[in-house]
Image (spheres, grey):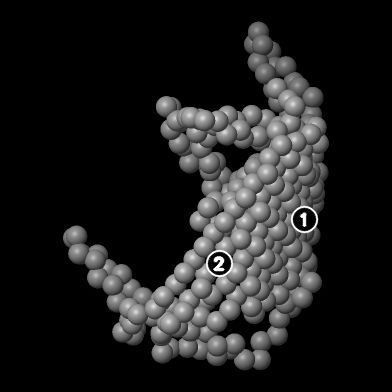
Amino acid sequence: MKWNILLYRSTYIDSNNSQNLNFPVNLNNPCLPCQTPTYITLKDIESKNRVSLLPYVYSGLSVDRKDNALMYGKPQGTVGLSGLFDINNITSLEHAINPYFSQVEADVSKITANNTFVIFFEERRPYFNEGNDIIETELNTVYTRSINKPLFSSKLISQGENKRIYWLAAYDEASPYLIAGKNRSYFGKGNASYSNIVRYQRTFKQGSNMEFLTTNRFFKDGGYGHTFGIDGVYRFKKSYTATFKFNKSFVLEPQAN
């Protein structure tokens, strides 16, 4: 395995910014890492497949004060299991049964006053973060935080020499629902739904690639939303790059308040 090494340093003195590389840059070549003369070669590496299981047990008790007396509520608890299995050295299968996301750090505060559109937040849950670079697009087609309270989810990631595959399926007990209006959007709490995300990427020489993406959601009480997308990058004559992106959505609103 031959890895190109790029050494980079950026320094700031007052308002001046100085950037240094370990090689002269050819501005007619859009592939920056391809130009570096420095590389290392890794040999005789033995890979071991990962197998991990992470069970959890959570319980809690709420207490209220009334007339200087403590009123104890009923104990509540839940159990769950998550795990990861490497099928081979390029493919992993991950699952989560009743996952517990309360330990994730809080979101950054955002001002919602005079904002007519719903605010989106970054994904902070580790289960959904791994492999997020595969489904990331400039059109923001996938928003994994719309899978809010999954009862069960499985995820398959395969990253070979010239192709990458991402597949995620989840059954969500309480799905957020977003409705697009003319001058604003409306946000509400939907019921249970089944979600599916599939991404396939085929890479070629000089960084050219073709990618396919589909997302699907079926609501238990009726209604669905599907998105199909295709995009690609074509590099030719060393200094030219052409890109295209296309998405198409199909939506059936549920009969609900």
Q: Amino acid at mark 1?
A: Ser
Identify which residue is drawn at 55% across, 88% down: 2
The residue at 66%/87% (across/down) is 45
Name which residue lies at 42% across and 82% down.
Answer: 238
Q: How far across and down, in percent of the image, does residue 160 sit? A: 67, 76
List the residue tagged with mark 2: 232
Residue 218 shown left or right of residue 113 in the figure: right
Q: Amino acid at mark 2?
A: Gly
Q: Nearer the viewer, mark 1 or mark 2?
A: 2
Residue 163 lies left or right of residue 169; in this view the side is: left
Q: Which mark is residue 163?
A: none
Q: Is residue 206 above or below residue 164?
A: below
Asked if the residues shown at circle 1 and circle 2 are in contact, with their CB atoms under 8 angstroms apart, the answer is: no
Return the x and y of residue 29 as percentages of the image width and height: 39, 80
Up/down of 202 relative to 61, above or below: below
Q: Nearer the viewer, residue 50 or 127?
A: 127
> In the displayed structure, does residue 52 sit left or right of residue 243?
right
Residue at 51% across, 89% down? 40
Asked whether residue 124 appears in the rendered view, the answer is: no
Q: Which residue is tagged 1?
A: 154
- Note whether residue 113 is visible: yes
Residue 121 lies, with reference to residue 64, above or below; the image says below
Nearest the viewer among 68 and 243 is 243
Q: From the image, which quarter does the N terminus lie in? A: bottom right
Q: How many marks?
A: 2
Rendered location of residue 74, percent (x, y)? 79, 24
226 relative to 120 in the view: left or right? right
- Reading the chain from its start, which is encountered first: label 1 or label 2? 1
Q: What is the crowding at mark 2: few (fewer than 14 residues within 10 Å), some, or many (at least 20)?
A: some
